[in-house]
Image (spheres, helix red, strand yellow):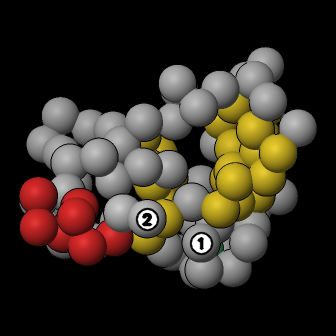
Amino acid sequence: MATVTMKQVRPGEVPKDGGTAVQEDPGRPVFRGNGPNDYVCVECGNVLAVSMHPDQMTFRVRVKCAVCRTINVAENDDRPPEQRRRRRI
Ligand SMILES: [Zn+2]
């Protein structure tokens, strides 16, 4: 098991074909799977998804935190090339 901190979605990084899951109860993750990772809000650390596979948490999957209203994404794979270059390790 690992805990993964999600990333904040910025304007322009949102793919048109994706959807945003809205968490309504801070104590209840919006996704519950059978994978190795738990995903937490980048801003406040609230648990948004539990037991998920990384394959399931793509850049198309976004979650709006019930606590701080931040929209989180696990990966920002659709960034423009210059931005991707800058932020890659
Ligand atoms: Zn939050």
Residue 81, position as x, y percentages in the image: 11, 58
Residue at image location 36% in from the left, 63% down from the top: 88
For residue 63, above or below residue 32: below
Q: Amino acid at mark 1?
A: Val
Q: Give the residue at x 11% y 59%.
A: 80
SS for callout 2: loop
Residue 29 located left or right of residue 2? left
Name which residue type carries label 2. Ile
Specify the label residue 42 is tagged with.
Answer: 1
Q: Quadrant of the N terminus?
A: top right
75 left or right of 17 in image:
right
Residue 73 x, y percent position in the rendering = 45, 54
Give the labeled residue for mark 2: 89
Q: Quadrant of ligand 1?
A: bottom right
The response on whether ligand 1 sits within 8 Å of label 1 is yes
Q: Are marks 1 and 2 in contact (CB under 8 Å)?
A: no
User: Percent position (x, y) of residue 75?
Assistant: 42, 49
Q: Looking at the image, which residue is at 75% across and 67% down?
A: 46
Residue sitting farthest toward the top: 34
